Structure formats: structure tokens, C-alpha cells
């Protein structure tokens, strides 16, 4: 697809939202079905609301908690969370304050609970709950695990709000069904940032975590998107009017950038420079980089397109001031020239203040319970370099024995098979219950052969092991 066509998809909004998380196959995570009646709309400003619609759990009220999130106070409405339970389970749904929720409890509940945190859902005013990925949901119910998932009170890049609302849902679950014997938290994409925040700051609430394609670095995810823009500006030779009043980036991205960089499959010399810098920035040579690069080539400009004046908190907090860029030899630019010439975005110190905005700073790595992660090698929305960064933080915090990481050899964002998802969760449970630490791998070095043990099945086009 030509660059102009890709950007047209972005302007329609579908590409940016589709790339944001490990989405399910429809609102309930299953093929469309007729939902049970019920569901409530959020009432902005309220602190207590009924917590279940007809067909859901028992009535009552619940109050949402405010611990890690930075709330804008935006008026939101909640999409009806009604869904149909799988065979052998019951569906419960409703609303806590401004966040909608779903709970599914097997008839033969094993006494354990999984909280699921969804990924980035755009910047609209309607918030919606997302069920776990289909394969994981089916596995949980079949094996007796209850699961619960919350929307977030606001949309945007809001991992702190996600952690708050997820914890509020856990408290509600306890009120309705009793205290689980064990509680796990799982999350995808930005939901991986939610998992990291929860295990670093609310670890007494959880026994273990599973991060899928997770933005484990926190605001480093947005720093990365700032780098994507800065490198494109430098390699194209253009000047983007970012941060200027009334900035309009449409002419730049629709006309000038395609002409200068080319398409991902037919790059100009400048486009090859751009791809090289991004490859080295995001983990180096690895399987399926090209596929992931093609998928995110234009989508990763989405945040700056939405907010060219850098008014949003995440953009004000983002910076590439200290980023060290590299480029392959023979492309007409040296690393020294690149680092001297690329635009540097300074962060707003107030926005990147851990006391006032704990969700707008890098994560710390100070986890206190086991965390297992899965990441696609060819993910260019949340690159596998986030795993490398988080490993360094966890090791520096003296918690390296609590982190197991696995690469999955696939292009794109959150592309995991049923076998990969269920094996990861089963291994996490065995680790928590029996102390059997699962196998992982070192993702901090050469990723050429990463993931061979954990990718199941190998994807079409995989280069296989390198002798």
C-alpha cells in the first residue's frame, strides 16, 4: 500500500486504534452474540453508582479509587458492557464510578482471579471495557479462573488511571464474590504499562503479572514515538511545525514525507536511513522487523497528528533529549552527524514530575511479585527495546529474579498464538503457586535467534536458526 493510502487510513482513525492493543474479536472477545439485557451509562462527576445490570451480579455500590492516575476531568460516557458468558460460566457487568466492567465467573470457580488491563483506546469520550484475548479467556474459564476487566475512566495514554480502575474492580469483586485465593494481573500494550505500575506500586494486591506486548517503560513509550517523528524529520530534511501555534502537519505527512522517504517497501535513500535508525533504536536486526516497520510506518505519527502543538500531558512529558541514535554504515550519514542534527524535544518538568504525575514518568523496575512478559520481535508500535529497558531497570532494582521475558518471532503488535498465550499464563501460575520459575531468555543482546524456543508455531517466512 502506498504511503498516502496508509495515512488516509490513519485520518479515518481506524489504523491508530487498531494498532493500540491486543484486541479481542468483538466487544465480548468472542464472535458477535446477542447480549443479555442491562448495562449502565456513566454519570460524570459521580462517585458511587450501581455496579451491575440485569443479568449481572448482585446490586450495590462501589467507589473508584484514585492512586496513580492523572485525571483530566473530561466528561465521558461508558459503552454498555453487557456480554454473553461462555458455557459453564456466568456474566456480571456494570459500572464503578465512570468505568464500566465485566466479570466472568466459572460455575466451578477455582477461587483464583485474573484482572485484565486493556491497551490504548484513542482519545474519544466513550470509554469501553475489553475482554481478554479470546484464547486466554477460553483457557481461563475452562480451567476455573474468574476474570474481570475494567474500562478506564478516561481515554488517552492513561496507565495510572488504568491501574486505579483495575484495583477498584478487584475491590468490587471481593465484595461480591469473596477474597480470591490468588490474584493475577494481565495487560496488553498500554495495559502492560498498567501491569508494571501495579506490580511496582500495588504489589500487595497481586500475586503475579503477565504483560503482553507491554509498554513496560512507561513514558518511554511516548519518548519512542517522539523519536520516530524526530528521525523522520532529520532524514527527510524537512522541518515539522511541531509545537507551533496552529500547527498543521497534514501537508507534510500527506505530500512531502511520502515524496522524500518513499514507501516502506520502496524507500528512497532517505527512507533507508530512516529505517536503519529505527531498526537500531528498537532492538537491532531481528526477525520480522520489516513486517512491523511496514505496519507502523505511518501509524506512529498518529500522536503528533492529533496533538501537533504538544498540549497533551503525554506529549509534554515526552523527550528524546538524551537518546543516542545509531545508523548502519554506508548510508551517507554518520552517527555523529545524526545525533548532532536530530531535533531534541525537551520535556515539561511539571508534566514529568513523579509526585504529581506518577503515570507520566518512566517505570522503576521495583516489582515485588513474579512478572512474565511476551513480546513480538517485529513489534514497532511498542518495540521489543522496551523489554531491554525494563530488564535493566529490574536488575538495577535488585529484582531480576522476578522477571522472565520471552520473545515471539512475529511481525506486528500483539500477535500471539493460542499456544503462546496459554503456555505463558500456565507457566506464570506454576511460578506463583509452586515456585517453579519458568524458562525465559536474555533479550538484551543480539535478537537474531531470539524466541526460537517460545514461538509456537513458527510463522511463515521465519528465517529459522542462524548457525
Image (cartoon, rainbow, N blue to C red):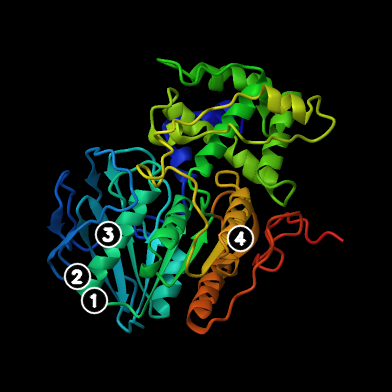
Q: Position of residue 53 (x, y in %)?
A: 16, 62
Q: Residue at label 2?
A: 57
| Disc 2, SS | loop
| Disc 1, SS | helix
Closest to the observer, 236 or 105: 236
Q: Is residue 93 above or below residue 377?
A: below
Q: Is residue 458 above or below residue 141?
A: above
| Disc 4, SS | helix
Query: Mark 2 or mark 1, which has the lower sequence index?
Result: 2
Are discs 3 and 4 less than 8 Å apart at CB? Answer: no
Closest to the observer, 329 or 205: 205
Query: Mark 3 or mark 4, which has the lower sequence index?
Result: 3
Q: Residue at label 1?
A: 177
Q: Residue at label 3?
A: 101
Closest to the observer, 427 or 269: 427
Q: Position of residue 258 (x, y in %)?
A: 62, 23
Are discs 2 and 1 less than 8 Å apart at CB? Answer: yes
Q: Residues within 10 Å of mark 3 (few under 14, many from 20)?
A: many
Nearer the observer, disc 3 or disc 4?
Answer: 4
Query: Mark 3 or mark 1, which has the lower sequence index?
Result: 3
Q: CA distance from mark 4 to mark 2?
A: 43 Å
Query: Mark 4 or mark 1, which has the lower sequence index?
Result: 1
Q: Residue at label 4?
A: 395
Nearer the observer, disc 3 or disc 1?
Answer: 1
Q: CA distance from mark 2 to mark 1?
A: 9 Å
Are discs 3 and 2 less than 8 Å apart at CB? Answer: no
Q: Residues within 10 Å of mark 2 (few under 14, many from 20)?
A: many
Determine the residue positioned at 38% across, 62% down: 202
Closest to the observer, 369 or 290: 369
Amino acid at each position: 500500500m502506498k504511503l498516502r493510502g496508509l495515512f488516509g487510513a490513519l485520518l479515518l482513525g481506524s489504523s491508530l486504534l487498531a494498532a493500540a492493543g491486543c484486541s479481542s474479536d468483538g466487544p465480548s472477545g468472542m464472535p458477535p452474540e446477542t447480549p443479555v439485557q442491562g448495562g449502565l451509562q456513566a454519570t460524570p462527576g459521580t462517585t458511587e453508582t450501581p455496579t451491575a445490570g440485569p443479568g449481572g451480579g448482585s446490586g450495590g455500590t462501589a467507589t473508584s479509587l484514585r492512586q496513580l492516575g492523572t485525571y483530566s476531568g473530561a466528561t465521558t460516557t461508558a459503552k454498555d458492557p453487557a456480554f454473553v458468558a461462555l458455557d459453564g460460566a456466568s456474566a456480571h457487568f456494570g459500572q464503578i464510578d465512570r468505568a464500566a466492567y465485566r466479570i466472568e465467573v466459572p460455575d466451578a470457580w477455582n477461587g483464583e482471579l485474573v484482572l485484565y488491563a486493556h491497551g490504548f483506546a484513542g482519545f474519544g469520550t466513550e470509554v469501553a471495557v475489553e475482554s481478554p484475548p479470546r484464547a486466554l479467556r477460553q483457557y481461563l474459564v475452562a480451567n476455573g479462573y474468574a476474570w474481570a476487566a475494567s474500562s478506564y475512566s478516561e481515554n488517552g495514554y492513561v496507565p495510572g488511571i488504568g491501574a486505579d480502575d483495575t484495583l477498584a474492580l478487584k475491590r468490587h469483586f471481593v465484595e461480591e464474590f469473596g477474597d480470591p485465593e490468588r490474584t493475577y494481573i494481565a495487560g496488553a500494550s498500554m495495559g502492560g504499562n498498567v501491569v508494571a505500575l501495579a506490580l511496582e506500586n500495588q504489589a500487595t494486591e497481586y500475586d503475579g503479572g503477565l504483560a503482553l506486548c507491554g509498554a513496560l517503560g512507561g513514558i518511554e513509550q511516548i519518548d519512542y514515538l517522539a523519536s520516530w517523528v524526530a528521525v523522520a524529520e532529520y532524514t527527510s530534511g524537512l522541518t515539522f511545525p511541531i509545537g507551533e501555534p496552529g500547527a498543521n502537519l497534514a501537508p507534510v505527512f500527506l505530500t512531502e514525507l511520502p515524496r522524500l522517504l518513499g514507501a516502506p517497501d520502496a524507500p528512497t535513500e532517505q527512507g533507508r536511513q530512516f529505517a536503519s535508525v529505527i531498526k537500531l533504536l528498537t532492538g537491532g536486526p531481528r526477525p520480522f522487523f520489516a513486517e512491523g516497520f511496514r505496519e507502523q510506518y505511518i501509524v506512529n505519527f498518529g500522536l503528533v497528528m492529533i496533538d501537533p502543538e504538544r498540549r497533551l500531558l503525554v506529549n509534554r512529558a515526552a523527550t528524546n533529549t538524551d537518546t543516542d541514535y545509531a545508523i548502519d554504515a554506508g548510508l551517507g550519514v554518520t552517527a555523529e552527524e545524526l545525533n548532532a542534527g536530530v531535533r531534541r524535544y525537551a520535556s515539561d518538568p511539571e508534566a514529568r514530575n513523579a509526585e504529581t504525575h506518577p503515570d507520566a514518568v518512566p517505570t522503576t523496575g521495583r516489582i515485588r511479585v513474579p512478572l512474565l512478559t511476551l513480546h513480538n520481535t517485529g513489534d514497532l508500535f511498542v518495540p521489543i527495546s522496551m523489554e531491554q529497558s525494563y530488564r535493566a531497570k529490574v536488575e538495577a532494582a535488585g529484582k531480576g529474579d522476578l522477571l522472565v521475558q520471552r520473545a515471539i518471532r512475529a511481525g506486528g503488535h500483539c500477535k500471539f498464538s493460542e499456544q503462546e498465550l496459554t503456555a505463558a499464563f500456565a507457566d506464570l501460575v506454576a511460578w506463583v503457586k509452586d515456585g517453579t520459575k519458568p524458562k525465559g531468555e536474555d533479550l538484551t543482546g543480539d535478537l537474531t535467534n531470539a524466541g526460537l524456543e517460545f514461538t509456537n508455531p513458527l510463522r511463515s517466512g521465519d528465517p529459522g536458526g542462524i548457525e
